[in-house]
Image (spheres, coloured by chain):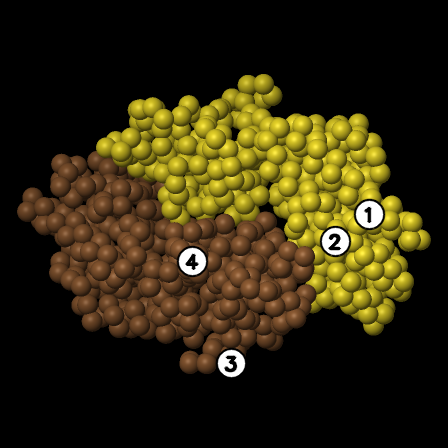
Chain colours: A yellow, B brown
Amino acid sequence: MNLDQIDTPALILDKSRLARNTAAMTARVRDLGVDLRPHLKTAKSADVARLALDGNFGGLAVATLREAEYFFDNGFSDMTYAACIVPSKLNRVAALCAKGADLKLITDNAGVARALSEYQAESGGADGRPLKVLIEIDCGEHRTGVLPDSPALLDIAGILDAADGIALEGVLTHAGHSYACRTPDEMAAVAEEERAAVVGAADRIRAAGHPCPTVSAGSTPCVMFVRDVTGLSEVRPGVYMFGDMFHAGLGTRKIDEIAITVLASVIAHREDDNQLYIDAGGLALSKDRATAAFEGDADCGYGLVCDAATARPIPGLKVASVHQEHGLVTSVGPMPFGDLPIGHRVRVMPNHVCMTVAAYDAYNVIESEAGTGTHLVPSST
Amino acid sequence: MNLDQIDTPALILDKSRLARNTAAMTARVRDLGVDLRPHLKTAKSADVARLALDGNFGGLAVATLREAEYFFDNGFSDMTYAACIVPSKLNRVAALCAKGADLKLITDNAGVARALSEYQAESGGADGRPLKVLIEIDCGEHRTGVLPDSPALLDIAGILDAADGIALEGVLTHAGHSYACRTPDEMAAVAEEERAAVVGAADRIRAAGHPCPTVSAGSTPCVMFVRDVTGLSEVRPGVYMFGDMFHAGLGTRKIDEIAITVLASVIAHREDDNQLYIDAGGLALSKDRATAAFEGDADCGYGLVCDAATARPIPGLKVASVHQEHGLVTSVGPMPFGDLPIGHRVRVMPNHVCMTVAAYDAYNVIESEAGTGTHLVPSST
């Protein structure tokens, strides 16, 4: 089996690149002296999680309860469900904890903290083990989370710490506004803003007499460029494992480090328009236009068109627009129709890998030799 | 079971609205005097296909071979795979035809037509039944397809008609540029452009001595507003079954006809920003921004926020931005936080239903009473 025998469109995972990316992050975070809790919302795969945890302490972050259930069923216990819990989801949480999962929740709301307290009082908890809850901190993204200097922070901490069957586990934040940065200095500045906010919140909680063992931060840009992690206990980057064209534009991953591509077939030539079509459209690539934030070549439309064997970009080509199952490929110069006959395969590097990966049931795994990227050894899916 | 017991985010299908939409289209196309070949690329469901075919002649259109295989396994035989075939997919086509599928292919390329001819000559075809192939016509969208007056049209027709084991089935086109229209008159004009192109191509093929039994056109806007179908044998609309906010903006579906919503929970309040967050983000809704084409209220961001019980819009609210699992809801006036406590459910009408539906494994089916939209009777998924 080789790339020519896989039905298109198909999701291709280059395991060699993935392994290099995960090993580099593991080394980086070990040097920083904090724990690495990789976020698996992107990869959604136990095989990938095992690579990301190789040499690490063992915990994961997930974005949905379905992800938590999947990873628990595949042998992972220590997980932080890093999106605000709502009371209607507590039965599902309790079922997972009763099976033995060490699942940590987050909240940014005193009413929810009270509801958690009441739920634990009524249900009795999972075998006497407390439910671990972190308080989400808004460090400047203005998404979810309480501001670190807000009265609500200590209200929530007080409710959680007083509740039977709940352990106040700490504080957690996500500097999603690091994605608006364009230079290492800007990313380092946001990383410091993130650190200061979440550590400041932890200090306030402790000063009020409550425990706060975990101080969790992290996005891929912040972890790549942070200069000081004083007070943090863990970081939760995720996209670093795979990379994508947005991260290539940010400078947090190089193009030859991107581990995920979409294999596609040329399905039509439009010589009158200097264009061609591939069978990877809005469903195969996603409609994410993150690279629209960049100028010039770094805006690759809906994806960068690469040679299938080498994964090297074909100069001047990008997926300029998408229909459901059609991708329109344009060329800066004359389209090399002769090199790209109908039926020829290309690989497309996506804008936003989280969106792209989510559309598929499985990875087609290949291994590329380090340095050359040309020798493909198919591996198990 | 009711909407309060479904885990969020979840895809909700209002079967009453679907049934009204499919019955209305069946009646419309019967009045036009052509066959309705509903496109199932949106719904991807055998149950939905059976409703769409109720009272029709029985054929479907699909966008991928995986869809064709699924529908064949669920009892459907007459299918048009309405995206350009490439030779590497022919083994999969042959396997489906060998099992009895009446699968029709399309091409816009003489080289592919020759490859089809060679494939049939080598393989002997499926039990002596010819492979049916239509020629795709570009009627003005400039996607795939040959121009109706091009020399290539008759080249391809000649190759297919001369090939052993191939039946030249006819011509097919898709006026995707109807989506750029904003008025019924504009849509009627594109529908006439589409009709003239594909009927003109059929006339040329017949004048050259080749058969052309099928003349297939259709997008939801064209079928809704076409005034003359002379020469067409069938139409292939798809989105009409469900509708979405883009079609509401076009005027091809009303908001109270939209049959698909995403059920979501309020997960956080940002009173300082007059905003709240729901647990439906870029994966649950898709990142499609089709309604950006409209001005004012018709641009609903990533989706229109509605009351969960009635599916009526909550005035002034929309999903203004999305993260992977977070949707930011903004309000033109003061956010009604009291009516939308944390844990409260809303339903979001998506921009582009094809993209939204594709992210889910199954529908949660409800039935709303005609006229009121308030009484929900859960049905099987």
Identity of the residue drawn at 21% across and 35% down:
B110
Q: CA distance from mark 3 to mark 1?
A: 47 Å
Tell me where residue B213 sits by quadrant.
bottom left
Q: Earlier in the sequence, mark 3 or mark 4?
A: 4
Q: Which residue is mark 3?
A: B375
Q: CA distance from mark 4 to mark 2?
A: 32 Å
**Residue in front for this viewpoint, B130 or A265:** A265
Q: Chain of mark 4?
A: B
**Residue in front for this viewpoint, B77 or B351:** B351
Q: Which residue is mark 2?
A: A146
Contact (Cβ within 8 Å) of mark 1 with mark 2 = yes
Look at the numbered disc 4 and give the secondary structure of its residue: helix
Q: CA distance from mark 2 to mark 3?
A: 38 Å
Res B296 label: 4
Q: Chain of mark 1?
A: A
- List x then y, in percent, for residue A349: 50, 34
Instruction: Give the foreground label among 3 and 1.
Output: 1
Q: CA distance from mark 1 to mark 2?
A: 9 Å
Res A327 label: none
Look at the numbered disc 3 and give the secondary structure of its residue: loop
- List x then y, in percent, for residue A220: 67, 36
- Mark 2 residue type: Val
Q: Are marks 2 and 3 on the same chain?
A: no
**Residue in front for this viewpoint, A162 or A147:** A147
In the image, taking residue A274 as reference, residue B289 lies left or right, namely: right
